[in-house]
Amino acid sequence: MFRRRRREQPEQAEQESAAPMRESGPWDADEPHPESDRIDLGGLRLPHNPDFDVRLASVGDQHVGVVVLYEESSLQLQALAAPRSSGLWDEVKAKIVGQAGHLEEREGPFGCELTGEMRVDSTTRPARYIGIDGPRWFLLAVISGKAALDETVAAAYIDFVKDVVVVRGDEPMAREEPIPLRRPNEQTGEGADERPGFNPFKRGPEISEIR
């Protein structure tokens, strides 16, 4: 099980009192945001929901995304580095459409999103692709399965995404480079059974579960 982050840093609390807070996230770690118990994965801090099965996805030895399972559905999350001057969603949308086949654009809670199907091995699943541009980061959320068609189930995922905190950091990163994640309290050199596979532009991930 994940361990929850008990409190945000004191300097963040000071920022909250000094500046107005947006109605909802995803939040940048450096902006005022609600203080709550969150799962600290380094590049992402996730709200705690006891109904969700949260897993970490890896490519080789790098943790690059999160998969959340709930009600015969899945939510894939990946945070990417973005340029300071512009967002990535327009070009990421073009890549998804080029590889996922026929998708439709529609307005959703975060703006324009794509709906249709995603290929998983030799089958397809209904899917929603949601992109959020932040300050020097981009968050891709892919909802698939029952929740892609059932707004009641999807609402729980949408609320989850609205309370995610992205920790971009100050280090230089290449355009579209995944913002690295880690297991809670992970120590350098710890081994784990990790299988490659999180690629939002191709097929569904094979994932490594955090226990």
Image: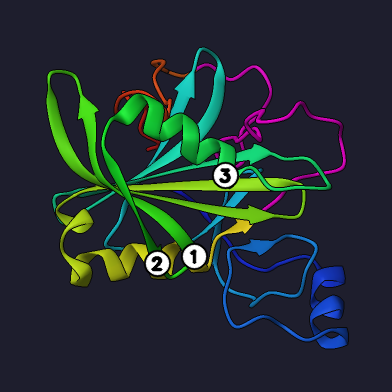
Which is nearer the eye, 133 or 165?
Answer: 133
Type of the residue with mark 1:
Gly
Q: Are marks 2 and 1 in contact (CB under 8 Å)?
A: yes
Judging from the image, what secondary structure is the residue with disc 1 in? strand
In three-dimensional space, the C-alpha distance between marks 2 and 1, rounded to whole angstroms, equals: 5 Å
Q: Is residue 193 above or below residue 53?
A: above
Crowd band around label 3 with a 10 angstrom C-alpha radius: few (<14), some (14–19), many (20+): few
Front label number (2 vs 3): 3
Type of the residue with mark 2:
Gly
The circle drawn on residue 111 is 1
Q: Which residue is mark 3?
A: 90
The magenta region covers: 166-191
Q: Residue at x 29, y 28 (%)?
A: 204
Residue 18 picture location, percent across and down:
88, 85
Which is nearer the eye, 81 or 103?
Answer: 103
Type of the residue with mark 3:
Asp
Which is nearer the eye, 187 or 139?
Answer: 139
Q: Are marks 2 and 3 in contact (CB under 8 Å)?
A: no
